[in-house]
Amino acid sequence: MFTIQPKRVTEIRKARGVGRPRLAKLSGLTERQIARLEGAIPSTGIHTEDTILRLASALQVRPETLMSTEALTSEDFLVVPQSRCCSRC
């Protein structure tokens, strides 16, 4: 089990211009799970490796970036190009 830094997920998601619905779709997680990961809904704070890998892949960051307490780099805030989506997420 691993621990994700909730504020870090929110910072990276917003900096990259990705909303919770879009992040949920990209990661295969639910919007409720994303809200929990960001600390908006109470959770245990412990997550599986699969959850971290899905989230990291969707945000295009290294998994360690989501768990670390080290300062974020400018690469962590690069905007990810968005593709057109017919479901308007």
Image (cartoon, rainbow, N blue to C red):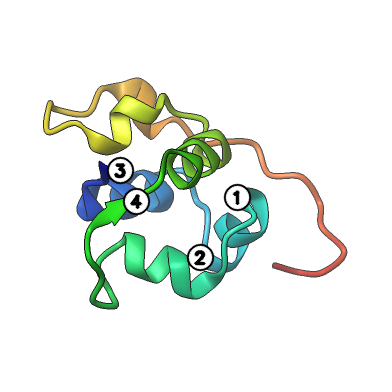
Classify 85 as above or below 72.
below
Q: Considering the image in quadrants, where does the C terminus appear? A: bottom right
| Picture coordinates of residue 88, whole percent (x, y) | 76, 69
Q: Nearer the viewer, mark 4 or mark 2?
A: 4
Q: Which disc, if any, is residue 1? A: 3
Classify 65 as above or below 1.
above
Which of the two discs, 3 and 4, labels the residue nearer the N terminus?
Answer: 3
Q: Which residue is mark 4?
A: 47
Structural distance between the alpha carbons of marks 2 and 1:
10 Å
Q: Which residue is mark 2?
A: 20
Asked which secondary structure carries label 2, the reply is helix
Which of the two discs, 3 and 2, labels the residue nearer the N terminus?
Answer: 3
Which of the two discs, 2 and 1, labels the residue nearer the N terminus?
Answer: 2
Structural distance between the alpha carbons of marks 3 and 1:
18 Å
Image marks 2 and 1: residues in contact by CB distance under 8 Å: no
Which of the two discs, 4 and 2, labels the residue nearer the N terminus?
Answer: 2
| Picture coordinates of residue 70, whole percent (x, y) | 12, 26
| Amino acid on which disc 3 is placed | Met
Which of the two discs, 4 and 1, labels the residue nearer the N terminus?
Answer: 1
Q: Nearer the viewer, mark 3 or mark 2?
A: 3
Structural distance between the alpha carbons of marks 3 and 2:
23 Å
| Amino acid on which disc 2 is placed | Arg
| Amino acid on which disc 4 is placed | His
Structural distance between the alpha carbons of marks 4 and 2:
18 Å
Structural distance between the alpha carbons of marks 4 and 1:
14 Å
Asked which secondary structure carries label 4, the reply is strand
| Amino acid on which disc 1 is placed | Ser
Image marks 3 and 4: residues in contact by CB distance under 8 Å: yes
